[in-house]
Every structure is written in structure tokens, then in C-alpha cells.
Image (cartoon, rainbow, N blue to C red):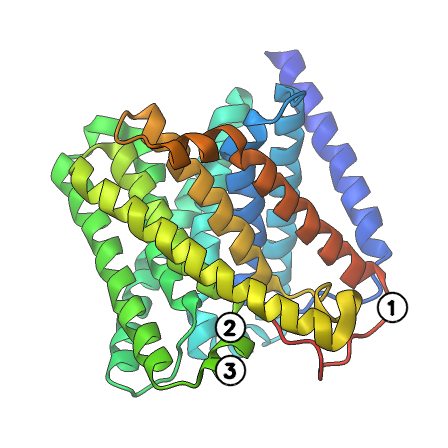
Amino acid sequence: MKKECLNTALCFFILLCLSGLVRYFYKKEPRPSTADGSIVMAIGIFSFDALLKLPLVSRGFTQLVTLELLIVWLFLVKNYLNQSLHGGFKCLINHTAGQFGIGTWVAGSSILALLFFRDFTCYRFIAWLCAFLAFIIWLPYLALSVCNLWLIVTRQRKVHIGIMLLATVSTQSIVLLTYFMFATTIPRLAYQAVIVLGYSLYFTGLFIIVRYLLYSRLSRIILGWHSTNSILHGALSISGLAAATTKVISDQLIIVTWFLATGFLLLVEGISVIKGIYRFRRAGFTEGILVYDVSQWARVFTLGMYYTFNLSLITHQVYVNPLIQWVAYYGQYGVLGIVLFELVNYFYYYLSSKRIDVHFAYKG
């Protein structure tokens, strides 16, 4: 055990040095955003299930991925602390969308905690630290999200993209983390209450988005389609996963959740494909498709979560059909593809000195 702990510490130090070296060659300084935690969310959920289902992937490799995620998480914490010390943090949370983005810290910390509980028995204190931070951030974030949703519903504030649904994602991630740590020692009613709360937050956000879309032209909807709208299906997937894992919600509701998540996935990603085709025709691949924005990690997370949800339906014997089986058997390759594309996109953006013409760079 002692040797394993020392080897882990050595690997962490080597990865930290390599990560710092890569960062040294960045041509652009990363712009801080409250949604930066989506990077940890996205790669974390990929590592949690899909990565394990890939051939030739060893336990040692998954541990390295978890350690690298911790390094990314620490870099983000450092950036946020620097912003706070220099007075820039207020600018990040001045607008409503930025406040909703804090949900990525909750979900990212929760997933990182789950990965450390799974991969490193001798560094449980890191898992407990991440879990503690997830809990203490979630409570005020939940109150802030409820207030913001009410202000948007009553038209006192204007937000109409999927980032609102991070309130659901963060809430259900807390359910999954709590169940992993305490399981049945927490009353069944408590799990039910929080899961239902997550669903309520989801349908409130869905109402706001649909209300906006009903009064928008089709061309405006497609060209303005934001990457965070993929959370329309991702939030349902994590809600279904929380319900299936805890077994405190009826199977019928979980099955309905799966059908809704699948329908929204086809709709949302279909619109994204149409937008991508337009961008490609207008500006080519490099300036039309290979345009990085931190919000794009939301799509990686939601597709990874959809895969995990499908896998859980089989594992917990909730519901199986040919599509679920197909996703469970082959979906990991699709998630791997989108992760690799986003990593290439990320490094191309930060290691290249080329600037993209904003006239063509429709974000999302």
C-alpha cells in the first residue's frame, strides 16, 4: 500500500510538470469563466464509465486520467483565487448566465470525488475534500439558482440557453455522490425529495427555453443555437441515472425519462449538426468548425452522461431495448471520438497564434 501511494505521488508530480510545460507554450491566456468546471465534468464522466469499456485500457491508465483531472481542477482553483484577489471574480458572476455556470464546480467536484473514491484508496482525503467543496458550493448555488429561475420566469432577467439546467445537473450529482458515500444510511425520502427537486428545476428551465423558442424565427434559433442546449438531454440523463442508482423512484418514471432524454438528444444534436453544416459552408473547417469555446464541453458531458444512463438501465435491470443495448455496447467509441475532437480543438486554439474572425466564429 505504501509503495502504491508513493508511485501515485510520483505520477502526480510528473503529470504536474508536464501539464505546466504544455501550459507554458500557450499562445493565448485562457479566459476565466464560471463554466470552466465543465472540462472536469466532461472528461470525468467519460472516465467514469465509457473509458473503462474501451479495449486495452488498463486500471493504471484510468488512474493517470484521474490524476490529470485533479491537476486541471487545481489549475482552475488557482485561477479563481487569482481572480478573487485581483477583483476580477465579480465580473464573472455579475451576469445571470455566469451565476448558473457555478453548477459546473459542483458537478465537476462531485465527479472528481467519485473517481478518487474508485481509483485511490490511499488518497481518500482528496475525495472527501472534493465532496466537501461540492456540498458547500451546492447549497448557496441552489438558492441562487431558484431565485434566478424565478426572475427569468417573471421576465425580470433574460437567459434562454441550457446553462440554466446546470441547476438540475449539480443537484443530481449531489444525489449520486451522497449515495456513493452513505448509501442507505440516508433516508429514502431524502433521496426522493432531492431527485424530485432536480426534476422541478429541469422543467422550469425547459419552460423558459421553450417560451423563448416559440417567439423566435427558425433561422435565428439554428444560428444562435448554443452548445449548452445539449444539457436539455444531459440533465435528463443524470436525473434518470440518479433515480436508477438510488432505486427510490419508480421504474416507469425512469423509462419516461429515458425516452425524453433520447428524443431531446436527437432534436438538440440534430439542430447542432445543421448549424455546423452552415458554419462549414460559410467559413470552412478551421474557422467554421474548429472554433473553441468552453461551453462546448457541455456536449461532451451530456453525451457521456447519456451513455452512462443507458448502461445503468441494464446494470440495475430497469429497462432494456435494442437501442439501449446498442448504446451500451458501442456508445463508448462515440464518446471517445467527441472527447478527442474537443481536446484537439482545445489545444489547437491555445497552442496556435492564429485568431479566428468573430464574424464567422458563431460560438457553440
Q: Which residue is mark 1?
A: 353
Label 3 amino acid?
Ser
Question: Residue at position x 36%, y 54% from top?
Answer: 263
| Secondary structure under the numbered disc 2 in the rendered image | loop
- The image shows residue 286 at horizontal and vertical percentages of 79, 66
Quadrant position of residue 180 = top left
- The image shows residue 116 at horizontal and vertical percentages of 51, 31
Instruction: Pick the quarter of the image with the N terminus.
Output: top right
- Closer to viewer: mark 1 or mark 3: 3
Task: Pick whichever of labels 1 and 2 is earlier in the sequence.
Answer: 2
- The image shows residue 145 at horizontal and vertical percentages of 32, 68
The correct choice, above or below, for 5 with respect to 112 in the image is above
The correct choice, above or below, for 85 with respect to 142 in the image is below
Quadrant position of residue 102 = bottom left
| Secondary structure under the numbered disc 1 in the rendered image | loop
| Left or right relative to 5: residue 246 | left
Tell me, for residue 225, which label it has, or none: 2
The correct choice, above or below, for 114 with respect to 263 in the image is above
Label 2 amino acid?
Trp
Residue 110 visible (yes or no): yes
Label 1 amino acid?
Ser
Residue placed most toward the observer, 123 or 248: 248
Mark-to-mark CA distance, 1 and 2? 27 Å
Q: Is disc 3 surrounded by few (<14), some (14 to 19) or many (20+) residues within 10 Å?
A: few
Tell me, for residue 219, which label it has, or none: 3
Question: Residue at position x 50%, y 61% from top?
Answer: 270
